[in-house]
Amino acid sequence: DGGITQSPKYLFRKEGQNVTLSCEQNLNHDAMYWYRQDPGQGLRLIYYSQIVNDFQKGDIAEGYSVSREKKESFPLTVTSAQKNPTAFYLCASSIWGGSNQPQHFGDGTRLSIL
Amino acid sequence: SQQGEEDPQALSIQEGENATMNCSYKTSINNLQWYRQNSGRGLVHLILIRSNEREKHSGRLRVTLDTSKKSSSLLITASRAADTASYFCATDGGGYQKVTFGTGTKLQVIP
């Protein structure tokens, strides 16, 4: 079955630590996205990538970094510079980038601070 | 950034009733999408409506778009307990590159 796999499902971060969230898709989609969702809130865009080896900052990129070395993979690193990382992180993909394309989501990673 | 605002924030109905939720936005759009999110899960795409369309249907779902009022509505007919979820609209603010999600309507369907 095609889809998006996020791992791990739960992640804990210590002070001063960087952590990396995995996102893999086998849908052959060009575009991929990372969102952050806080309790009772909508999604806020962190980074997006419309093609391999290219990505753009979203609305809340500070304290985060990404890479897009392979079409299937778009890992997100939450750095120690992100002072409030506790949230639900969602990865999505679409056939190509654009607001006329539906996005397919993974089931998220819940990040908490130890 | 431009954002859709859903209304109401929460809605509780009996199974079999219809549920209507609304999305208002601030600037002209090219496309508007509706998504569903079950608790603790990712979002699922429901319907995309373009700015030159006024209404779209998908099964028990009906979406309308009024660009003059900058608003859209999602109607779920004959609701079921399985429809219990949060529903989000996503707008593009007139651009094409990305969408912005609203804060959602939390729907509870009571069996």
Image (tube, helix red, strand yellow):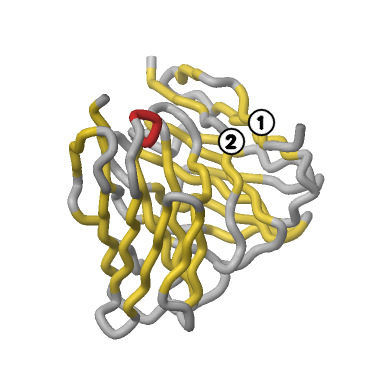
Label 1 CA crowd tier, 10 Å (few <14, some 14–19, many 20+): some
* Labels 1, 2: one chain: yes
What's the residue at 31%, 63% (across, down)?
B73
Q: Amino acid at mark 2?
A: Gly
Residue picked out by circle 2: A106
Disc 1 chain ID: A
Which structural element holds mark 1? strand
- Looking at the image, residue A21 lies above or below residue A92: above
Are the residues tagged 1 and 2 within 8 Å (C-beta)?
yes
Q: Quadrant of the C terminus of chain B?
A: top left
Which structural element holds mark 2? loop
Q: Position of residue A54 (x, y in %)?
A: 72, 59
Q: Which of B55 and A58 lies nearest the eye of the viewer?
A: B55
Q: Visible in this render: residue A61?
A: no
Cα distance in 3D space between marks 1 and 2: 6 Å
Q: Quadrant of residue A9?
A: top right
Q: Position of residue B33 (x, y in %)?
A: 46, 61
What's the residue at 81%, 45% (across, down)?
A70
- Looking at the image, residue B33 lies above or below residue A109: below
Specify whether B53 is left or right of A69: left
Q: Disc 1 or 2, which lies upstream in sequence?
A: 1
What's the residue at 51%, 43% (across, down)?
B44
Q: Visible in this render: residue B4?
A: yes
Specify whether A48 is left or right of A83: right
What's the residue at 71%, 35% (across, down)?
A24
Please count the marks in the image.
Answer: 2
Q: Position of residue A2 (x, y in %)?
A: 75, 37
Residue picked out by circle 1: A5
